[in-house]
Amino acid sequence: MLEKAATKRTTQLMPKFDEYDVEQEIDCEASGSHNKNVLKKPKPKGPLDRFVTTPPPDILLGRKQEKGIFGACVKDAREKTVRAIARWIYDAGIPFNCVTYESFDQMLEEIAQYGLGLQPPTMYALRVPLLKKEVDDTHAQLVEHKKEWASKGCSIMSYGWRDSVV
């Protein structure tokens, strides 16, 4: 009697799934010595399967073909853009490892987000207002570090540096 009550409680807690996905039944042809068709078990549907559908294969095939046609134009545009970036790096004498910096990736992302028509900064803008903003941002970041230095202490170690104040 107790076993029957326990099994009844456990079956009541388990969700009931009686729906089967008929589309998932696929006839598989076995290769080799087996010539009979084997049916896959139907996949039981869950409660969220009503809201999620997989796109038909013909739509996915069409998407792949579109990418192939568009890819040729994108490849040429990327080649032209990358060569212009490389030419600028060579002309400015910037070390090649600059492309590994996180700030380089951020710069490219911001340029892409802005889109067409971005006016480059002038030499004056780079030298005065933009540099001042970066210095202010650096000082703002140092405030948190200075608070930590006050509570935990800080040692600055340097090799071969001395204060030349006389």
Image (cartoon, helix red, strand yellow):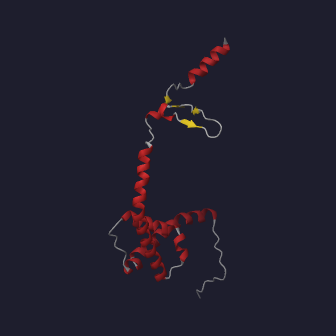
- Residue 142 % position (x, y): 53, 67
64 or 116: nearer the viewer: 64
Specify the quadrant that holds the N terminus. Answer: top right
Task: Work out whether 63 lies above or below 91.
Answer: above
In this rendering, would 110 be left or right of 2? left
Residue, x 53% and y 63% (percent of image)? Answer: 144
Name the quadrant containing residue 52.
Answer: top left
Judged from this view, the residue extending furthest toward the left is 117
Name the quadrant containing residue 80.
Answer: bottom left
- Residue 38 % position (x, y): 58, 33
Specify the quadrant that holds the C terminus. Answer: bottom right
Judged from this view, the residue extending furthest toward the top is 1
Task: Work out whether 165 lies above or below 131.
Answer: below
29 or 151: nearer the viewer: 29
In this rendering, would 65 be left or right of 147? left
In this rendering, would 158 be left or right of 87? right
- Residue 101 % position (x, y): 53, 69
Residue, x 63% and y 68% (percent of image)? Answer: 154
* Total numbered badges shown on the rendered structure: 0
43 or 51: nearer the viewer: 43
Residue, x 52% and y 74% (percent of image)? Answer: 98
Residue, x 47% and y 66% (percent of image)? Answer: 106
157 or 128: nearer the viewer: 128
- Residue 31 % position (x, y): 62, 40
